[in-house]
Image (spheres, helix red, strand yellow):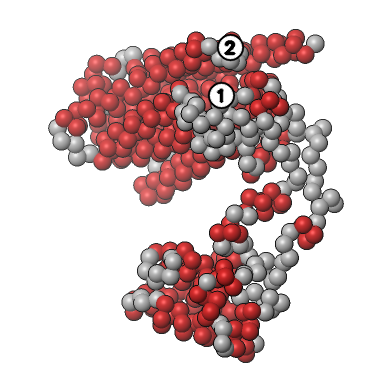
Protein backbone atom coordinates (compact mmCIF):
# COMPACT_ATOMS: atom_id res chain seq x y z
CA UNK A 1 0.00 0.00 0.00
CA UNK A 2 1.22 3.43 -0.80
CA UNK A 3 1.34 6.18 1.74
CA UNK A 4 -0.99 8.56 0.04
CA UNK A 5 -4.47 9.09 1.37
CA UNK A 6 -7.64 10.93 0.64
CA UNK A 7 -7.56 14.58 1.48
CA UNK A 8 -11.09 14.40 2.84
CA UNK A 9 -11.13 14.16 6.59
CA UNK A 10 -7.65 15.53 7.00
CA UNK A 11 -8.03 18.78 5.19
CA UNK A 12 -10.69 21.42 4.90
CA UNK A 13 -10.61 23.67 1.89
CA UNK A 14 -12.57 26.30 3.78
CA UNK A 15 -9.88 26.34 6.44
CA UNK A 16 -6.86 26.34 4.18
CA UNK A 17 -8.08 28.27 1.16
CA UNK A 18 -8.66 31.98 0.86
CA UNK A 19 -11.94 33.34 2.19
CA UNK A 20 -14.69 32.66 -0.37
CA UNK A 21 -17.10 35.42 -1.30
CA UNK A 22 -19.95 34.70 -3.65
CA UNK A 23 -18.56 32.92 -6.67
CA UNK A 24 -15.11 32.68 -5.19
CA UNK A 25 -13.47 35.78 -6.55
CA UNK A 26 -12.93 38.84 -4.46
CA UNK A 27 -11.29 41.34 -6.73
CA UNK A 28 -9.15 44.02 -5.25
CA UNK A 29 -9.82 47.46 -6.73
CA UNK A 30 -6.27 47.67 -8.04
CA UNK A 31 -6.72 44.40 -9.92
CA UNK A 32 -9.73 45.61 -11.79
CA UNK A 33 -8.01 48.73 -13.00
CA UNK A 34 -10.12 51.17 -14.96
CA UNK A 35 -13.19 49.00 -14.94
CA UNK A 36 -13.38 49.25 -11.18
CA UNK A 37 -13.85 52.98 -11.51
CA UNK A 38 -16.90 52.48 -13.65
CA UNK A 39 -19.15 51.72 -10.74
CA UNK A 40 -17.86 54.45 -8.45
CA UNK A 41 -19.73 57.59 -7.78
CA UNK A 42 -23.09 56.01 -8.49
CA UNK A 43 -25.34 53.49 -6.88
CA UNK A 44 -23.57 50.61 -8.61
CA UNK A 45 -20.31 51.62 -7.03
CA UNK A 46 -21.48 50.74 -3.57
CA UNK A 47 -22.77 47.48 -4.95
CA UNK A 48 -19.40 46.60 -6.43
CA UNK A 49 -17.42 47.59 -3.41
CA UNK A 50 -19.49 45.45 -1.09
CA UNK A 51 -17.90 41.97 -0.95
CA UNK A 52 -20.89 40.42 0.79
CA UNK A 53 -23.16 41.04 -2.18
CA UNK A 54 -23.84 38.53 -4.91
CA UNK A 55 -20.91 38.19 -7.31
CA UNK A 56 -20.80 40.69 -10.12
CA UNK A 57 -20.14 38.33 -12.97
CA UNK A 58 -20.61 40.91 -15.74
CA UNK A 59 -18.08 43.15 -14.08
CA UNK A 60 -15.62 40.33 -13.82
CA UNK A 61 -16.08 39.36 -17.44
CA UNK A 62 -15.66 42.91 -18.46
CA UNK A 63 -12.51 43.10 -16.35
CA UNK A 64 -11.21 39.96 -18.03
CA UNK A 65 -12.00 41.24 -21.47
CA UNK A 66 -10.46 44.58 -20.61
CA UNK A 67 -7.33 42.93 -19.26
CA UNK A 68 -6.82 40.56 -22.18
CA UNK A 69 -7.37 43.18 -24.83
CA UNK A 70 -5.55 45.84 -22.83
CA UNK A 71 -8.50 48.15 -23.30
CA UNK A 72 -8.49 47.87 -27.08
CA UNK A 73 -11.97 47.34 -28.43
CA UNK A 74 -10.86 45.48 -31.57
CA UNK A 75 -9.71 41.88 -31.88
CA UNK A 76 -11.34 38.49 -31.86
CA UNK A 77 -10.72 37.90 -28.15
CA UNK A 78 -12.32 41.21 -27.30
CA UNK A 79 -15.28 40.36 -29.45
CA UNK A 80 -15.94 36.98 -27.89
CA UNK A 81 -15.46 38.24 -24.36
CA UNK A 82 -17.76 41.08 -25.15
CA UNK A 83 -20.31 38.61 -26.44
CA UNK A 84 -20.11 36.52 -23.29
CA UNK A 85 -20.36 39.64 -21.21
CA UNK A 86 -23.49 40.83 -22.95
CA UNK A 87 -25.01 37.37 -22.68
CA UNK A 88 -24.55 37.57 -18.98
CA UNK A 89 -26.06 40.96 -18.67
CA UNK A 90 -29.04 39.84 -20.70
CA UNK A 91 -29.56 36.62 -18.78
CA UNK A 92 -29.22 38.41 -15.46
CA UNK A 93 -31.85 40.92 -16.59
CA UNK A 94 -34.15 38.05 -17.50
CA UNK A 95 -33.79 36.45 -14.09
CA UNK A 96 -34.94 39.61 -12.43
CA UNK A 97 -32.74 41.37 -9.94
CA UNK A 98 -33.14 44.11 -7.44
CA UNK A 99 -33.24 47.71 -8.52
CA UNK A 100 -29.70 48.47 -7.49
CA UNK A 101 -28.22 45.69 -9.59
CA UNK A 102 -30.39 46.63 -12.53
CA UNK A 103 -29.08 50.17 -12.36
CA UNK A 104 -25.51 48.94 -12.45
CA UNK A 105 -26.17 46.53 -15.27
CA UNK A 106 -27.91 49.14 -17.33
CA UNK A 107 -24.93 51.37 -16.92
CA UNK A 108 -22.53 48.58 -17.86
CA UNK A 109 -24.65 47.75 -20.89
CA UNK A 110 -24.66 51.32 -22.01
CA UNK A 111 -20.93 51.84 -21.40
CA UNK A 112 -19.96 48.65 -23.08
CA UNK A 113 -22.24 48.81 -26.07
CA UNK A 114 -21.90 52.46 -26.91
CA UNK A 115 -18.52 53.60 -25.71
CA UNK A 116 -16.09 50.71 -25.37
CA UNK A 117 -16.93 48.81 -28.52
CA UNK A 118 -16.95 50.66 -31.82
CA UNK A 119 -18.34 47.70 -33.68
CA UNK A 120 -20.31 47.97 -36.87
CA UNK A 121 -24.07 47.60 -36.96
CA UNK A 122 -23.58 44.04 -38.21
CA UNK A 123 -21.62 43.09 -35.12
CA UNK A 124 -24.06 44.93 -32.88
CA UNK A 125 -26.92 43.00 -34.39
CA UNK A 126 -25.14 39.71 -33.70
CA UNK A 127 -24.29 40.87 -30.20
CA UNK A 128 -27.95 41.52 -29.53
CA UNK A 129 -29.41 38.40 -31.12
CA UNK A 130 -27.02 35.84 -29.69
CA UNK A 131 -27.64 36.74 -26.02
CA UNK A 132 -31.37 36.45 -26.66
CA UNK A 133 -30.83 33.03 -28.25
CA UNK A 134 -28.88 32.00 -25.20
CA UNK A 135 -31.92 32.62 -23.06
CA UNK A 136 -34.31 30.90 -25.43
CA UNK A 137 -32.44 27.81 -26.53
CA UNK A 138 -32.09 25.16 -23.83
CA UNK A 139 -28.85 23.76 -25.23
CA UNK A 140 -27.28 27.19 -25.39
CA UNK A 141 -28.60 27.91 -21.95
CA UNK A 142 -26.58 24.94 -20.82
CA UNK A 143 -23.55 26.59 -22.35
CA UNK A 144 -24.36 29.68 -20.35
CA UNK A 145 -24.50 27.55 -17.24
CA UNK A 146 -21.08 26.13 -18.09
CA UNK A 147 -19.74 29.61 -18.66
CA UNK A 148 -21.26 30.67 -15.40
CA UNK A 149 -19.49 27.80 -13.73
CA UNK A 150 -16.27 28.74 -15.43
CA UNK A 151 -16.66 32.29 -14.27
CA UNK A 152 -16.23 31.09 -10.73
CA UNK A 153 -12.65 30.30 -11.63
CA UNK A 154 -10.20 33.05 -11.11
CA UNK A 155 -9.72 35.12 -14.20
CA UNK A 156 -6.83 37.37 -13.42
CA UNK A 157 -3.23 36.36 -14.05
CA UNK A 158 -2.73 36.03 -10.35
CA UNK A 159 -5.62 33.62 -10.05
CA UNK A 160 -4.69 31.61 -13.13
CA UNK A 161 -1.40 30.93 -11.42
CA UNK A 162 -3.38 29.32 -8.64
CA UNK A 163 -4.98 26.82 -11.03
CA UNK A 164 -2.42 24.01 -10.43
CA UNK A 165 -3.01 24.45 -6.70
CA UNK A 166 -6.79 24.29 -7.18
CA UNK A 167 -6.39 21.08 -9.21
CA UNK A 168 -4.04 19.64 -6.65
CA UNK A 169 -6.46 20.48 -3.83
CA UNK A 170 -9.27 18.79 -5.75
CA UNK A 171 -7.33 15.54 -6.05
CA UNK A 172 -6.42 13.13 -3.30
CA UNK A 173 -3.22 14.09 -1.56
CA UNK A 174 -0.21 12.94 -3.55
CA UNK A 175 3.41 12.46 -2.62
CA UNK A 176 5.71 15.23 -3.73
CA UNK A 177 8.45 14.80 -6.27
CA UNK A 178 11.97 13.89 -5.20
CA UNK A 179 15.57 14.45 -6.24
CA UNK A 180 17.51 12.13 -8.53
CA UNK A 181 19.41 10.74 -5.55
CA UNK A 182 16.10 9.50 -4.11
CA UNK A 183 15.21 7.21 -7.01
CA UNK A 184 17.02 4.10 -8.30
CA UNK A 185 19.60 4.76 -10.97
CA UNK A 186 17.38 3.21 -13.66
CA UNK A 187 15.00 6.17 -13.45
CA UNK A 188 17.60 8.94 -13.55
CA UNK A 189 17.94 10.99 -16.69
CA UNK A 190 21.17 12.82 -17.54
CA UNK A 191 21.25 16.47 -16.42
CA UNK A 192 17.77 16.19 -14.84
CA UNK A 193 18.30 16.69 -11.12
CA UNK A 194 14.80 16.94 -9.68
CA UNK A 195 11.08 16.44 -10.33
CA UNK A 196 11.18 12.62 -10.11
CA UNK A 197 8.14 10.77 -8.86
CA UNK A 198 8.88 8.30 -6.06
CA UNK A 199 8.55 4.60 -6.85
CA UNK A 200 6.44 2.01 -5.09
CA UNK A 201 3.09 3.78 -4.83
CA UNK A 202 -0.33 2.63 -6.00
CA UNK A 203 -1.26 2.75 -9.67
CA UNK A 204 -3.77 5.54 -9.11
CA UNK A 205 -1.00 7.84 -7.92
CA UNK A 206 0.77 7.48 -11.25
CA UNK A 207 -2.49 7.98 -13.16
CA UNK A 208 -3.33 11.11 -11.17
CA UNK A 209 0.21 12.39 -11.62
CA UNK A 210 -1.10 13.55 -15.00
CA UNK A 211 -2.05 16.69 -13.05
CA UNK A 212 1.07 16.90 -10.95
CA UNK A 213 4.17 18.95 -11.69
CA UNK A 214 6.98 16.47 -12.38
CA UNK A 215 9.68 15.90 -14.97
CA UNK A 216 7.56 13.59 -17.16
CA UNK A 217 4.31 15.53 -17.23
CA UNK A 218 5.10 17.54 -20.38
CA UNK A 219 6.06 14.32 -22.18
CA UNK A 220 2.66 12.89 -21.28
CA UNK A 221 0.63 15.94 -22.26
CA UNK A 222 2.38 16.51 -25.60
CA UNK A 223 1.42 13.05 -26.84
CA UNK A 224 -2.00 13.11 -25.19
CA UNK A 225 -2.89 16.33 -27.01
CA UNK A 226 -1.40 15.02 -30.25
CA UNK A 227 -3.52 11.83 -30.01
CA UNK A 228 -6.66 13.93 -29.49
CA UNK A 229 -5.69 16.18 -32.41
CA UNK A 230 -5.19 13.17 -34.71
CA UNK A 231 -8.58 11.75 -33.68
CA UNK A 232 -10.40 15.05 -34.15
CA UNK A 233 -8.75 15.78 -37.51
CA UNK A 234 -9.53 12.31 -38.81
CA UNK A 235 -13.10 12.52 -37.55
CA UNK A 236 -13.57 15.90 -39.26
CA UNK A 237 -12.26 14.36 -42.49
CA UNK A 238 -14.67 11.42 -42.20
CA UNK A 239 -17.56 13.79 -41.55
CA UNK A 240 -16.68 15.99 -44.51
CA UNK A 241 -15.70 13.34 -47.05
CA UNK A 242 -17.48 10.22 -45.91
CA UNK A 243 -15.28 7.16 -45.62
CA UNK A 244 -16.15 3.84 -47.25
CA UNK A 245 -15.29 1.87 -44.10
CA UNK A 246 -15.57 -1.54 -45.75
CA UNK A 247 -13.69 -0.62 -48.92
CA UNK A 248 -10.14 -1.87 -49.47
CA UNK A 249 -9.24 1.64 -50.60
CA UNK A 250 -9.72 3.05 -47.09
CA UNK A 251 -7.99 0.21 -45.24
CA UNK A 252 -4.39 1.56 -45.30
CA UNK A 253 -5.66 4.95 -44.10
CA UNK A 254 -7.53 3.33 -41.21
CA UNK A 255 -4.47 1.31 -40.23
CA UNK A 256 -2.31 4.42 -40.37
CA UNK A 257 -4.64 6.38 -38.08
CA UNK A 258 -4.84 3.39 -35.75
CA UNK A 259 -1.03 3.12 -35.68
CA UNK A 260 -0.64 6.86 -34.95
CA UNK A 261 -3.08 6.72 -32.04
CA UNK A 262 -1.38 3.53 -30.82
CA UNK A 263 2.13 4.95 -30.71
CA UNK A 264 1.00 8.21 -29.09
CA UNK A 265 -1.05 6.34 -26.47
CA UNK A 266 1.68 3.80 -25.67
CA UNK A 267 4.21 6.60 -25.37
CA UNK A 268 2.10 8.67 -22.99
CA UNK A 269 1.34 5.56 -20.89
CA UNK A 270 5.06 4.78 -20.71
CA UNK A 271 5.90 8.26 -19.47
CA UNK A 272 2.94 8.32 -17.08
CA UNK A 273 3.31 4.91 -15.47
CA UNK A 274 6.95 3.86 -15.76
CA UNK A 275 7.94 5.25 -12.36
CA UNK A 276 5.98 2.65 -10.38
CA UNK A 277 8.74 0.03 -10.30
CA UNK A 278 11.72 -1.22 -12.26
CA UNK A 279 9.60 -3.92 -13.90
CA UNK A 280 6.97 -1.31 -14.86
CA UNK A 281 9.69 0.88 -16.29
CA UNK A 282 10.91 -1.89 -18.58
CA UNK A 283 7.41 -3.14 -19.42
CA UNK A 284 5.99 0.23 -20.44
CA UNK A 285 9.03 1.22 -22.47
CA UNK A 286 8.88 -2.12 -24.29
CA UNK A 287 5.22 -1.40 -25.05
CA UNK A 288 6.29 2.06 -26.25
CA UNK A 289 8.78 0.47 -28.68
CA UNK A 290 6.06 -1.84 -30.01
CA UNK A 291 4.00 1.30 -30.68
CA UNK A 292 6.91 2.89 -32.56
CA UNK A 293 7.33 -0.12 -34.84
CA UNK A 294 3.58 -0.25 -35.49
CA UNK A 295 3.61 3.44 -36.41
CA UNK A 296 6.58 2.96 -38.72
CA UNK A 297 4.78 0.25 -40.64
CA UNK A 298 1.50 2.21 -40.67
CA UNK A 299 3.42 5.10 -42.26
CA UNK A 300 5.06 2.77 -44.77
CA UNK A 301 1.64 1.47 -45.83
CA UNK A 302 0.13 4.88 -46.58
CA UNK A 303 3.33 6.16 -48.21
CA UNK A 304 3.34 3.10 -50.46
CA UNK A 305 -0.37 3.12 -51.37
CA UNK A 306 -1.30 6.80 -51.47
CA UNK A 307 1.87 8.88 -51.85
CA UNK A 308 4.38 7.06 -54.07
CA UNK A 309 5.16 8.33 -57.54
CA UNK A 310 4.78 5.92 -60.48
CA UNK A 311 8.53 5.82 -61.26
CA UNK A 312 9.36 4.95 -57.64
CA UNK A 313 6.57 2.38 -57.50
CA UNK A 314 7.80 0.53 -60.59
CA UNK A 315 11.25 0.03 -59.03
CA UNK A 316 10.38 -0.81 -55.42
CA UNK A 317 6.86 -2.28 -55.33
CA UNK A 318 8.03 -5.86 -54.81
CA UNK A 319 10.20 -5.57 -51.73
CA UNK A 320 9.23 -2.25 -50.12
CA UNK A 321 6.55 -3.54 -47.74
CA UNK A 322 8.36 -6.73 -46.64
CA UNK A 323 11.52 -4.65 -46.01
CA UNK A 324 9.49 -2.02 -44.12
CA UNK A 325 7.91 -4.74 -41.95
CA UNK A 326 11.34 -6.22 -41.19
CA UNK A 327 12.82 -2.79 -40.35
CA UNK A 328 9.81 -2.04 -38.14
CA UNK A 329 10.37 -5.25 -36.18
CA UNK A 330 14.15 -4.65 -36.08
CA UNK A 331 13.57 -1.18 -34.69
CA UNK A 332 11.41 -2.58 -31.88
CA UNK A 333 13.84 -5.42 -31.21
CA UNK A 334 16.86 -3.08 -31.22
CA UNK A 335 15.26 -0.66 -28.75
CA UNK A 336 14.04 -3.45 -26.44
CA UNK A 337 17.39 -5.23 -26.54
CA UNK A 338 19.31 -2.00 -25.83
CA UNK A 339 17.03 -1.35 -22.87
CA UNK A 340 17.48 -4.91 -21.62
CA UNK A 341 21.23 -5.16 -22.21
CA UNK A 342 22.68 -1.84 -21.07
CA UNK A 343 22.49 -0.13 -17.68
CA UNK A 344 23.21 3.41 -16.62
CA UNK A 345 25.47 5.14 -17.31
CA UNK A 346 24.60 4.06 -20.83
CA UNK A 347 27.43 3.32 -23.32
CA UNK A 348 27.31 4.69 -26.88
CA UNK A 349 26.45 1.19 -28.09
CA UNK A 350 23.00 1.53 -26.56
CA UNK A 351 22.21 4.58 -28.65
CA UNK A 352 23.54 2.80 -31.74
CA UNK A 353 21.24 -0.19 -31.10
CA UNK A 354 18.30 2.19 -30.84
CA UNK A 355 19.07 4.77 -33.51
CA UNK A 356 20.50 2.63 -36.35
CA UNK A 357 17.49 0.29 -36.87
CA UNK A 358 15.06 3.19 -36.35
CA UNK A 359 17.07 5.30 -38.80
CA UNK A 360 17.06 2.50 -41.38
CA UNK A 361 13.31 2.11 -40.99
CA UNK A 362 12.82 5.85 -41.40
CA UNK A 363 14.97 6.06 -44.55
CA UNK A 364 13.08 3.19 -46.11
CA UNK A 365 9.60 4.34 -45.05
CA UNK A 366 10.17 7.90 -46.17
CA UNK A 367 11.74 6.97 -49.54
CA UNK A 368 8.49 7.22 -51.58
CA UNK A 369 7.77 10.58 -49.96
CA UNK A 370 11.32 11.91 -50.48
CA UNK A 371 11.25 10.86 -54.14
CA UNK A 372 7.96 12.66 -54.75
CA UNK A 373 9.05 15.76 -52.81
CA UNK A 374 12.29 16.08 -54.82
CA UNK A 375 10.53 15.56 -58.15
CA UNK A 376 7.83 18.06 -57.26
CA UNK A 377 10.22 20.75 -56.07
CA UNK A 378 12.38 20.32 -59.18
CA UNK A 379 9.39 21.16 -61.34
CA UNK A 380 8.11 24.13 -59.28
CA UNK A 381 5.92 22.43 -56.73
CA UNK A 382 2.23 23.34 -56.66
CA UNK A 383 0.87 20.38 -54.73
CA UNK A 384 -0.32 21.20 -51.23
CA UNK A 385 0.19 17.60 -50.09
CA UNK A 386 3.86 17.75 -51.06
CA UNK A 387 4.37 20.80 -48.87
CA UNK A 388 2.93 18.90 -45.91
CA UNK A 389 5.20 15.96 -46.74
CA UNK A 390 8.19 18.33 -46.81
CA UNK A 391 7.16 19.61 -43.39
CA UNK A 392 6.87 16.11 -41.94
CA UNK A 393 10.44 15.36 -43.07
CA UNK A 394 11.80 18.59 -41.55
CA UNK A 395 9.92 18.07 -38.27
CA UNK A 396 11.08 14.47 -38.05
CA UNK A 397 14.74 15.40 -38.56
CA UNK A 398 14.53 18.08 -35.88
CA UNK A 399 12.84 15.64 -33.50
CA UNK A 400 15.53 13.01 -34.21
CA UNK A 401 18.21 15.51 -33.21
CA UNK A 402 16.54 16.17 -29.86
CA UNK A 403 16.02 12.43 -29.32
CA UNK A 404 19.71 11.74 -29.83
CA UNK A 405 21.22 14.69 -27.94
CA UNK A 406 20.39 15.81 -24.38
CA UNK A 407 20.00 19.43 -25.44
CA UNK A 408 19.41 21.99 -23.91
CA UNK A 409 19.66 20.37 -20.44
CA UNK A 410 23.30 19.51 -21.11
CA UNK A 411 24.12 23.22 -21.09
CA UNK A 412 21.75 24.10 -18.25
CA UNK A 413 21.87 21.11 -15.89
CA UNK A 414 19.05 21.23 -13.39
CA UNK A 415 17.30 24.15 -15.09
CA UNK A 416 15.19 22.13 -17.54
CA UNK A 417 13.94 19.55 -15.05
CA UNK A 418 10.22 20.21 -15.40
CA UNK A 419 9.94 22.08 -18.69
CA UNK A 420 12.33 22.40 -21.60
CA UNK A 421 14.47 19.27 -21.74
CA UNK A 422 15.33 17.62 -25.03
CA UNK A 423 12.90 14.69 -24.81
CA UNK A 424 9.99 17.10 -24.47
CA UNK A 425 11.14 18.98 -27.56
CA UNK A 426 11.47 15.63 -29.33
CA UNK A 427 7.86 14.83 -28.39
CA UNK A 428 6.61 18.21 -29.55
CA UNK A 429 8.29 17.96 -32.96
CA UNK A 430 7.25 14.34 -33.41
CA UNK A 431 3.65 15.38 -32.70
CA UNK A 432 3.65 18.13 -35.32
CA UNK A 433 5.45 15.73 -37.70
CA UNK A 434 2.56 13.26 -37.27
CA UNK A 435 -0.05 15.98 -37.79
CA UNK A 436 1.69 17.21 -40.97
CA UNK A 437 1.93 13.64 -42.19
CA UNK A 438 -1.76 13.05 -41.49
CA UNK A 439 -2.71 16.19 -43.40
CA UNK A 440 -0.56 15.14 -46.38
CA UNK A 441 -1.98 11.61 -46.38
CA UNK A 442 -5.57 12.88 -46.26
CA UNK A 443 -4.85 15.12 -49.26
CA UNK A 444 -3.21 12.22 -51.12
CA UNK A 445 -6.08 9.89 -50.23
CA UNK A 446 -8.58 12.36 -51.64
CA UNK A 447 -6.61 13.50 -54.66
CA UNK A 448 -4.92 10.34 -55.95
CA UNK A 449 -7.69 7.75 -55.89
CA UNK A 450 -7.46 7.02 -59.61
CA UNK A 451 -3.75 6.15 -59.40
CA UNK A 452 -4.45 3.95 -56.40
CA UNK A 453 -7.28 2.04 -58.07
CA UNK A 454 -5.27 1.45 -61.26
CA UNK A 455 -2.30 0.02 -59.37
CA UNK A 456 -3.77 -2.18 -56.68
CA UNK A 457 -6.28 -5.00 -56.57
CA UNK A 458 -8.31 -5.46 -53.37
CA UNK A 459 -6.52 -8.77 -52.74
CA UNK A 460 -3.04 -7.18 -52.77
CA UNK A 461 -4.27 -4.50 -50.34
CA UNK A 462 -5.75 -7.07 -47.96
CA UNK A 463 -2.50 -9.07 -48.04
CA UNK A 464 -0.42 -5.97 -47.31
CA UNK A 465 -2.71 -4.97 -44.45
CA UNK A 466 -2.63 -8.47 -42.99
CA UNK A 467 1.14 -8.10 -42.70
CA UNK A 468 0.45 -5.15 -40.38
CA UNK A 469 -1.03 -7.52 -37.82
CA UNK A 470 1.80 -9.98 -38.40
CA UNK A 471 4.28 -7.22 -37.53
CA UNK A 472 2.28 -6.29 -34.41
CA UNK A 473 2.39 -9.93 -33.29
CA UNK A 474 6.15 -10.29 -33.92
CA UNK A 475 7.02 -7.03 -32.16
CA UNK A 476 4.75 -7.79 -29.20
CA UNK A 477 6.22 -11.32 -28.90
CA UNK A 478 9.79 -9.93 -28.91
CA UNK A 479 8.91 -7.37 -26.25
CA UNK A 480 7.14 -10.01 -24.13
CA UNK A 481 10.14 -12.35 -24.40
CA UNK A 482 12.61 -9.68 -23.23
CA UNK A 483 10.24 -8.63 -20.47
CA UNK A 484 10.25 -12.18 -19.15
CA UNK A 485 14.05 -12.12 -19.11
CA UNK A 486 14.03 -8.79 -17.28
CA UNK A 487 11.50 -10.12 -14.78
CA UNK A 488 13.71 -13.13 -14.08
CA UNK A 489 16.73 -10.87 -13.64
CA UNK A 490 14.91 -8.55 -11.24
CA UNK A 491 13.54 -11.48 -9.22
CA UNK A 492 17.05 -12.88 -8.94
CA UNK A 493 18.37 -9.51 -7.82
CA UNK A 494 15.69 -9.21 -5.11
CA UNK A 495 16.26 -12.70 -3.70
ZN1 LIG B 1 9.09 9.70 -25.10
Residue 179 or residue 441, whichever sits in front: 179
Q: Earlier in the sequence, mark 1 or mark 2?
A: 1
Q: Residue at image x 60%, y 15%?
A: 344
Which of the numbered marks, if any, corresponds to residue 457?
Answer: none
Determine whether, in the image, residue 297 is placed left or right of residue 24.
Answer: left
Determine whether, in the image, residue 457 is placed left or right of residue 326.
Answer: left
In the rendered image, the quadrant that contains the N terminus is top right
| Gap in angstroms between the C-alphas marked 1 and 2 | 15 Å
Q: Is residue 80 above or below residue 478?
A: below
Which of the numbered marks, if any, corresponds to residue 342?
Answer: 2
Residue 15 in picture, x, y percent from top left: 80, 59
Residue 37 or residue 262, whichever sits in front: 37
Residue 233 or residue 220, whichever sits in front: 220
Hey, which quadrant is residue 367 in on the image?
A: top left
Q: Which residue is mark 1?
A: 190
Q: Is residue 236 above or below residue 304?
A: below
Residue 251 in picture, x, y percent from top left: 41, 32
Hey, which quadrant is residue 176 in on the image?
A: top right
Residue 195 in picture, x, y percent from top left: 63, 35
Indicate the secondary structure of the residue bearing disc 2: loop
Does residue 455 appear anywhere in the picture?
A: no
Amino acid sequence: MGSWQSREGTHSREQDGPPQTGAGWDPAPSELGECWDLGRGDQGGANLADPTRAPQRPVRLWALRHRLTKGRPAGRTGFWLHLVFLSWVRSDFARGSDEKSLGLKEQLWSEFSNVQMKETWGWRWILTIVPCAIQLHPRVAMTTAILERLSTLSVSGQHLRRLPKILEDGLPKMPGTVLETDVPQLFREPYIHAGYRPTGHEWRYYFFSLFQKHNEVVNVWTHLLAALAVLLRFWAFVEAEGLPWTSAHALPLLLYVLSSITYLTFSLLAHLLQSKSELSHYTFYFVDYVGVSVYQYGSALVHFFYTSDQAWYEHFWLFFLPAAAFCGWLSCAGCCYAKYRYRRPYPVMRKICQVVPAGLAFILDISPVAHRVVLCHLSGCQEQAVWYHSLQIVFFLVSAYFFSCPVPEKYFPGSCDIVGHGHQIFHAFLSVCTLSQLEAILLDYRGRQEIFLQRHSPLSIYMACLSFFFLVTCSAATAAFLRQKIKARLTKKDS
